[in-house]
Amino acid sequence: MTTALASPRSLRRPRATWLSSPLVNQLKAPVVCIGLTLLVWQLLCLGNADGFPGPIQVIRQTWDPYISKPFYDDGGTSKGIGLQILISLQRVAIGYTLAAVIGIAAGMAIGLNAFLRRGFDPLIQVLRTVPPLAWLPISLLLLQQADSAAIFVIFITAVWPIVINTAVGIREIPQDYTNVARVLRLRKRSYVRDILLPATAPYVFTGLRISVGLAWLAIVAAEMLKADGGIGFFIWDAYNAGGDSSTSQIILAILVVGLVGLALDRLVGLVGDRVAAGGR
């Protein structure tokens, strides 16, 4: 009786499967590209100790207390970068929620009524192009408080994409849906719940996703000019303070602002996907 010899290929150890996992494949490109960017940044800053800091110098100069203690509180506006972010997020939450509620309601009214659509379209097209900071002096004159003015700037910046996308979504509802509703003699409430809302949800969440980025942009800009606390205040305060580590503090804050903005965008997108999947 002969024993078959195992082939050399069968004697090899199995390759690690985690290297080909979907998560690793998805992370390969970002990790490589970000790593190369940091490497180039660091190389460009070598031999320039008094100039623009490289990533290693940024981490070294901001580690204590900004990275190691992000939620420290020494009273007043002397707070860690984590608390400054929370202050900004609180303002954004209020202004963005107001923009979402009013924007969706106004968008539905404009989308359903041709007279309102023709009447308000020129006004919306004019106001939506006004830069966020142009509203700050007016809001300060009207509201007399920095926090309220910042929230108003967020609202007036974020509301227009929601209004426009909601109105467009209503206009894009297939005529067959409306005809079926008339044949079935659906009540207004049933029509809104069963046809209008599911059909316009993708458009509404597109507007919400655009608006959350604009809201985050607006609050940072508003806090840089007039605010007590917040990440925009943190950036402007670091600039005014000067010193060897001020540039590193600003760079750290910019990176944190970008990461939080990315997280907000992904969060709204995730909620939109869940709503769309639930409506199928």
Image (cartoon, rainbow, N blue to C red):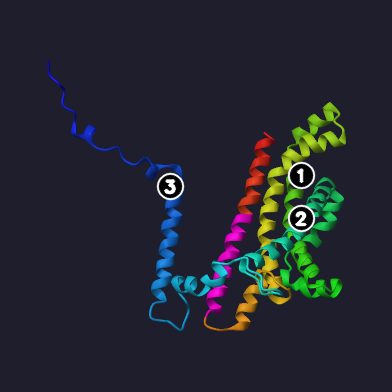
Mark 1 secondary-structure assignment: helix
- Identify the residue at image location x=72%, y=69%: 132
Amino acid on which disc 2 is placed: Thr
274 left or right of 96?
A: left
Q: CA distance from mark 1 to mark 3?
A: 41 Å
Residue at the disc numbered 3: 24
Q: Is residue 144 above or below residue 11?
A: below
Q: Within 10 angstroms of label 3, few (less than 14), some, or many (20 or more) residues?
A: few
Look at mark 1 in the image and give the residue it sits on: 170
Q: Name above or below for residue 179 compared with residue 139.
A: above
How crowded pointer 1 is (Cα within 10 Å; few <14, some 14-19, many 20+) is rated as many
Residue 128 locus on image (x, y percent): 74, 63
Magenta segment, which residues? 245-264
Looking at the rendered structure, the kind of residue marked 3 is Val
Among the 4 quarters of the image, the one containing residue 226? bottom right
Residue bearing the label numbered 2: 97
Q: Picture coordinates of residue 35 (x, y %)?
A: 42, 62
Amino acid identity at mark 1: Ile
> Foreground residue, 170 or 52?
52
